């Protein structure tokens, strides 16, 4: 009840219509709508909690975690890092804090997603109430946003959610503030918030969103486009026979907000230009157009009716929508039907449709251009992870059309007041919501198929159980993270913040590797080159000073693993080097033991030098090569 009341109070000056009447009955209806809004948001959080519970870290999540394990999380090197063309210090901050407080804890990461989703959902609910008032149609627009599959893939992926959830929340909040500021008090209602407070609040929110995701630069144009449309609708309702002058009104009333948002965006743009770099590859207008069309035809259109129901996946890629031809046809029929009814029934609907369609196409085209090259697979657009802000704009467009003044004769207007029509609209909303839930469940099952979750669980357990044994660094499996993410694909980065784990270094006395499934298995060294044993014995050690062990062939410049079986007279330390490469210091123990050292260099011998006074060693035959998992061969 407190949530519903707060939502209604956040929407001052909403329209009074046949579904939102004044007096006790009107307040009762508003309270009912508020309760329904709260119920829908809670239902969404329950569903999203299940989605999060079935997920785990994926791809860029591990890159963020790896960087949090190598750089101080408060440093500019960490916060200002150019991440694949993104400038996202706030997202890095959240990921870094979560990694430090609870390393590789998916429940903590999932909690940040759920909190972000709650904030975004409340902000969208507030926006829709400001635009359309407390009416049943507002619930339909909100239900679309809360449950559409267009927002699910970006939510399930932590790194993507850290970008897009603040964008959704900020866009909805600033749009509502711009409308409240430019539309002014309505129906005699007194403003509940000072204009200066609105301006300052929106500027701060926009700045925070930009710190999470550069796409938040689109908040300014969509906020003022929405304000112009809202003022225009108000003028059409009040003076239907006079030309509208919405633009001058918005320019005058929204001057302070416009200047504040422009200032924030300009400062951010300068920093972004200095830090970020565009994506690699040769961009293509033709490929951008194909990617944009695929996103609309196979993503947005089926998503409006709750599709696609079916998803495919090419691991390690994320799931992508594969709607059937029937879903696409149904989607287009519904979309064109809704547009047609809106144009026929509501004045000013044409401009709303143009703005909404223009935003969806332009926003997707910008992403397609920046995130693709001539060889980019079209399935990239079907992952739907670039569409959550489009869902906010589509819900906004629906609310604007609903709040527009009716067109036509009184008899035409009464068509929508008939009970069968209302029941049909409610049934359609329920059907689309159920369809969206089915699509969400299908996506989640595909998302759960990834190998990362089991690998991380096994690796955490294995590293904790072997925390006392030094270990060589190695890359995570290709199915978890490709080498293009180097060095953040190395286990020394991914697991750096674990409290109980082996030390990753240049030597070990027990060669172990993480298998592709994350379990710990004995390792071995390939025989690229070998050296013969020394002439002495354990009771007559031959190495008492710097000694070169000749190899059976030369080594090229590389980082090599040297396997040295030895017998030492006492505990101490030695250095091992490949040819004239930099020496690596390693400990030895009295008695017969193995030693594995990784060192970079080139040459025809391995150089061993005792550092501890009185230490002597006998070395048996050894070899030089690369570490591998014998179980795979």
Image (tube, rainbow, N blue to C red):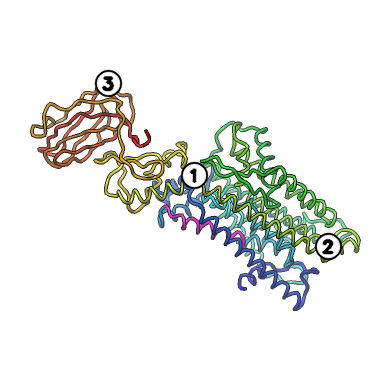
Q: What residue sits right under mark 2 in the picture? A: 416
Residue 210 seen in render:
no
Task: Find residue 164 and report its horizontal and vertical position in percent.
Answer: 58, 51
Residue nearest the viewer, comparing 198 with 289: 289
**Inter-mark Cα distance, 3 to 2:** 88 Å
The magenta stretch spans which residues? 104-121
- Secondary structure of the residue carrying tag 3 is strand
Q: What residue sits right under mark 3 in the picture? A: 553
Task: Find residue 566 and report its horizontal and vertical position in percent.
Answer: 17, 35
- Secondary structure of the residue carrying tag 1 is loop
Task: Find residue 528 and report its horizontal and vertical position in percent.
Answer: 30, 26
The answer to which quarter of the image holds residue 186 is bottom right
**Inter-mark Cα distance, 1 to 3:** 40 Å
Q: What residue sits right under mark 1 in the picture? A: 59
The answer to which quarter of the image holds residue 328 is top right
Q: Residues within 10 Å of mark 2 (few under 14, many from 20)?
A: few
The answer to which quarter of the image holds residue 568 is top left
């Amino acid at each position: 009840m407190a949530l519903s009341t707060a939502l209604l109070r956040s929407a001052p000056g909403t329209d009074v219509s046949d579904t939102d009447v004044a007096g006790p009955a009107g307040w009762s209806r508003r309270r009912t709508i508020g309760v329904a809004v709260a119920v829908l948001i809670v239902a969404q959080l329950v569903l999203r909690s299940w989605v999060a519970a079935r997920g785990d870290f994926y791809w860029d999540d591990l890159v963020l975690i790896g960087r949090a394990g190598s750089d101080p999380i408060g440093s500019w090197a960490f916060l200002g890092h150019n991440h694949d063309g993104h400038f996202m210090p706030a997202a890095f901050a959240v990921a870094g804090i979560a990694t430090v407080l609870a390393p590789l804890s998916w429940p903590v990461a999932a909690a940040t997603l759920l909190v972000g989703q709650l904030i975004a959902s409340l902000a969208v609910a507030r926006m829709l109430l400001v635009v359309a008032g407390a009416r049943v149609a507002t619930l339909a627009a909100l239900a679309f946003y809360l449950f559409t599959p267009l927002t699910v893939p970006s939510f399930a992926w932590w790194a993507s959610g850290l970008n897009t959830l603040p964008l959704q929340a900020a866009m909805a909040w600033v749009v509502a503030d711009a409308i409240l500021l430019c539309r002014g008090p309505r129906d005699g209602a007194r403003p509940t918030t000072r204009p200066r407070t609105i301006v300052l609040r929106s500027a701060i929110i926009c700045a925070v969103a930009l710190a999470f995701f550069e796409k938040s630069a689109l908040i300014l144009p969509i906020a003022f486009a929405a304000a112009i449309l809202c003022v225009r609708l108000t003028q059409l309702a009040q003076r239907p026979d006079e030309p509208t002058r919405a633009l001058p009104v918005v320019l005058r009333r929204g001057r302070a907000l416009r200047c504040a948002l422009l200032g924030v965006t300009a400062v951010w743009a300068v920093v972004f230009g200095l830090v970020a770099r565009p994506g690699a590859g040769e961009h293509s207008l033709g490929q951008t157009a194909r990617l944009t069309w695929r996103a609309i035809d196979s993503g947005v259109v089926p998503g409006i009716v709750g599709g696609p129901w079916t998803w495919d996946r090419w691991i390690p890629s994320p799931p992508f929508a594969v709607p059937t031809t029937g879903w696409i046809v149904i989607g287009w029929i519904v979309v064109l039907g809704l547009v047609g009814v809106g144009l026929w029934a509501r004045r000013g609907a044409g401009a709303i449709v143009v703005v909404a369609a223009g935003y969806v196409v332009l926003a997707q085209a910008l992403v397609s251009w920046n995130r693709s090259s001539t060889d980019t697979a079209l399935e990239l657009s079907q992952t739907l992870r670039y569409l959550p802000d489009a869902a906010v704009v589509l819900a906004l467009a629906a609310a604007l059309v609903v709040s527009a003044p009716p067109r036509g004769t009184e008899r035409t207007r009464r068509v929508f007041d008939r009970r069968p029509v209302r029941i049909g609209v409610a049934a359609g909303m329920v059907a689309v919501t159920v369809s969206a839930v089915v699509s969400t469940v299908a996506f989640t099952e595909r998302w759960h198929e990834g190998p990362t979750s089991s690998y991380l669980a096994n690796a955490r357990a294995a590293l904790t159980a072997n925390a006392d044994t030094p270990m060589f660094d190695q890359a995570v499996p290709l199915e978890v993270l490709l080498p293009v993410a180097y060095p953040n694909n190395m286990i020394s980065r991914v697991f750096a913040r674990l409290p109980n784990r082996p030390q990753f270094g240049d030597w070990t006395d027990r060669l172990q590797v993480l298998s592709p499934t994350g379990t710990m298995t004995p390792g071995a060294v390939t025989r690229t080159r070998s050296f013969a044993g020394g002439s002495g014995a354990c009771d007559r050690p031959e190495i008492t000073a710097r000694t070169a062990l000749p190899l059976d062939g030369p080594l090229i410049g590389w980082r090599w693993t040297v396997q040295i079986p030895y017998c030492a007279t006492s505990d101490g330390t030695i250095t091992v080097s490949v040819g004239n490469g930099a020496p690596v210091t390693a400990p030895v123990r009295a008695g017969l033991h193995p030693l594995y050292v990784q060192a970079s260099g080139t040459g025809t011998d391995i150089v061993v030098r005792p550092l501890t006074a009185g230490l002597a060693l006998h070395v048996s035959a050894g070899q030089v090569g690369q570490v591998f998992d014998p179980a795979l061969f």
